Image (tube, grey):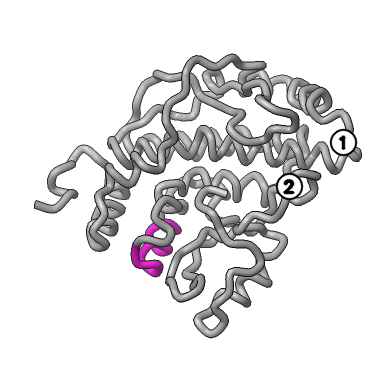
């Protein structure tokens, strides 16, 4: 019996995702479980995302404390941009993965999302977390509500915190596309790109405009990658660098990622980054 017949509780997109995985001998629940990071214990939070949205100076002040030797406004903007990417990858991505596995998941809730203290200086990854619990919603409501919520958060990140449209929406798109990133090199690239792009189009926000899923050849392996059309600016930080989806090198990468030029430059892509 097909997986889509065994799990009628999941939504249309999760069923199509499961069917795509089945064609490559993969099982949806196992793949998602592998992609989800193990749950951590109790964590403390400096402030919630809701507080940050109401008072953006909280995040600006925190960056000043953690990054006192910054090189000015541009570096602060880059630091916040990378923290916003972490919000997408540490909160939105696991919720989307749970939705594809279980057919329901809590929505990203600004009142339940917190910025954790840094474990080491200048840490920008695994900082945001959402408290366990919350009402689980089905795929249709998740798409409708998550799209609206990320659109509501955008003006503060753009106007008060200086995150560019390309950075904000491409990072958000990576979070919403997490199930597809989990199998970027394990299923048919053309089918994966088509399904992933169609999924992003459902959210009625601008994420789809700043992420383009494209087939790519790395070495001799056909893969699919989400190419950002905006940059998170991580390369501006002393401890940063260029990620494999970096918008700075988008044109160069698109020219290089052809069957005739099998190369991984500039930067080997890693799922979720």
Q: Position of residue 104 (x, y in %)?
A: 32, 33
- Decide if residue 89 is on the left or right side of residue 232: left
Q: Is residue 55 above or below residue 226?
A: above
Q: Residues within 10 Å of mark 2 (few under 14, many from 20)?
A: some
Q: Residue shown at 87%/28% (left/top)? A: 68
Q: Residue shown at 68%/25% (left/top)? A: 118
Residue ID for mark 2: 240
Q: CA distance from mark 1 to mark 2?
A: 13 Å
Q: Main secondary structure of the magenta part?
A: helix
How many marks do you count on the picture? Answer: 2
> Which residue is farthest bottom?
260
Q: Is residue 6 above or below residue 230?
A: above
Q: Is residue 178 magenta?
A: no
Residue ID for mark 1: 70
Could you say whether the residue bearing mark 1 is in a helix, strand or loop?
Answer: loop
Q: Looking at the rendering, which quadrant does residue 220 occupy?
A: bottom left
> Which residue is farthest left?
1
- Decide if residue 189 is on the left or right side of residue 55: left
Q: Position of residue 106 (x, y in %)?
A: 40, 27
Q: In this view of the protein, which residue sits in the foreground, 203 or 111? A: 111
Could you say whether the residue bearing mark 2 is in a helix, strand or loop?
Answer: loop
Q: Position of residue 42 (x, y in %)?
A: 50, 15
- Decide if residue 239 is on the left or right side of residue 209: right
Q: Residue shown at 31%/53% (left/top)? A: 17
Q: Position of residue 74 (x, y in %)?
A: 85, 43
Q: Looking at the rendering, which quadrant does residue 9 occupy?
A: top left
Q: Is residue 112 above or below residue 177?
A: above
* Span shown in magenta: 187-197
């Amino acid at each position: 019996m097909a997986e889509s017949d065994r799990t009628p509780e999941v939504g249309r997109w999760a069923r199509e995702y499961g069917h795509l995985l089945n064609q490559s001998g993969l099982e949806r629940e196992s793949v998602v479980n592998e992609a989800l990071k193990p749950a951590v214990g109790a964590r403390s939070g400096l402030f919630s995302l809701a507080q940050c949205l109401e008072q953006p100076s909280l995040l600006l002040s925190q960056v000043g404390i953690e990054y006192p030797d910054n090189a000015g406004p541009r570096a602060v903007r880059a630091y916040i941009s990378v923290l916003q990417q972490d919000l997408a990858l540490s909160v939105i991505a696991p919720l989307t993965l749970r939705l594809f596995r279980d057919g329901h998941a809590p929505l990203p809730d600004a009142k339940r999302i917190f910025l954790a203290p840094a474990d080491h200086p200048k840490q920008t990854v695994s900082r945001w977390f959402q408290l366990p619990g919350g009402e689980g919603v089905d795929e249709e409501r998740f798409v409708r509500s998550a799209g609206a919520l990320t659109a509501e958060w955008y003006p503060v990140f753009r106007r008060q915190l200086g995150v560019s449209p390309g950075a904000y929406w491409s990072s958000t798109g990576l979070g919403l596309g997490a199930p597809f990133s989990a199998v970027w090199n394990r299923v048919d690239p053309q089918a994966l790109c088509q399904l992933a792009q169609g999924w992003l189009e459902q959210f009625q926000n601008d994420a789809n405009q700043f992420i383009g899923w494209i087939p790519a050849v790395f070495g001799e392996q056909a893969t699919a990658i989400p190419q950002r059309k905006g940059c998170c600016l991580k390369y501006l930080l002393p401890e940063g660098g260029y990620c494999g989806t970096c918008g700075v090198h988008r044109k160069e990468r698109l020219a290089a990622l052809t069957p005739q030029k099998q190369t991984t430059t500039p930067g080997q892509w890693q799922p979720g980054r």
